[in-house]
Amino acid sequence: MEKIALFVDVQNVYYTTRDAYQRRFDYNAFWRQVTAGREVVQAVAYAIDRGDKKQQEFQNILRAIGFEVKLKPFIQRQDGSAKGDWDVGITIDVMEAQAQVDTVVLVSGDGDFALLADHVGRKGTGFEVYGVPNWTAQSLAKAASQFHAIEEPLLL
């Protein structure tokens, strides 16, 4: 059975599905689709923690599905801008997991991950990307061994 590791950039998928479809990503449908006939070695969802009760409920849903939830505090700068991404954390976790799996699955459209996809692919591990068409960087879609469009039936 194919071994996979799943990595979800929660903020990226939230904003891209919202902006493209005015809808939300269906994590349960995604889990059923991506894990069919595969063994999940690791599944991590990366989110920003604002201490919001609704977000905490959502994080508990992710845990119930099977994800480990990693949180980073939301940082509001004095100039009004905000900071809170997981690019480095995701990259480290993917690189640590790749030797244990046949395929890495990333849910994100962030073009910064194109270099990671290239690196993982050169090491002989598959690299699948789930992203919203037209909101996923072309460099990432091209670097992936397989690109899956987030559209029906992966939307709520």
Image: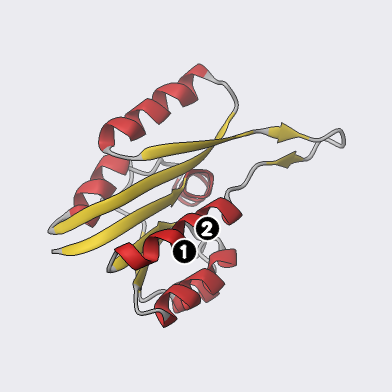
Image coordinates of residue 16 in percent, x first then y, are 51, 51
Are the two marked residues, 2 and 1, in contact with CB atoms closer than 8 angstroms? Answer: yes
Amino acid type of the residue tagged 1 in the rendering: Met
Within 10 Å of disc 2 (Cα), the crowding (few <14, some 14-19, many 20+) is: few
Q: Is residue 69 above or below residue 58?
A: below
Give the total of numbered labels: 2
Q: Residue furthest right?
A: 79
Q: Distance between the residues labelled 2 and 1?
A: 5 Å
Residue 11: x, y in percent?
Answer: 53, 44
- The quadrant the N terminus occupies is bottom left
Quarter holding residue 58: top left
Q: What element carries label 1?
A: helix
User: Which residue is most to the top?
Assistant: 53
The residue under the point 35% across, 63% down is: 104
In the picture of the structure, the residue carrying the numbered disc 2 is: 92
Q: In this view, does 78 lie above or below 27?
A: above
Q: In the rendering, at what x and y percent does residue 29 appear?
A: 24, 45
Evaluate whether residue 129 shows in this view. no
Tell me the element at label 2.
helix
Q: Horizontal and vertical percent for residue 152?
A: 29, 53
Task: Tell me what residue is drawn at x 49 percent, y 76 percent.
Answer: 119
Image position of 22 with respect to 140: above or below: above
Pick the quarter of the image with the C terminus: top left
Q: Is residue 75 visible?
A: yes
Q: What residue type is labelled 2?
A: Ile
| Numbered mark located on residue 49 in the image | none
Give the residue at the far bottom of this rendering.
122
Q: In this view, does 103 lie to the left or right of 20?
A: left
Q: How crowded is mark 1: few (under 14 residues within 10 Å), some or many (20 or more)?
A: some
Q: Which residue is drawn at 51% across and 54% down?
A: 90
Q: Name the residue under label 1.
A: 95
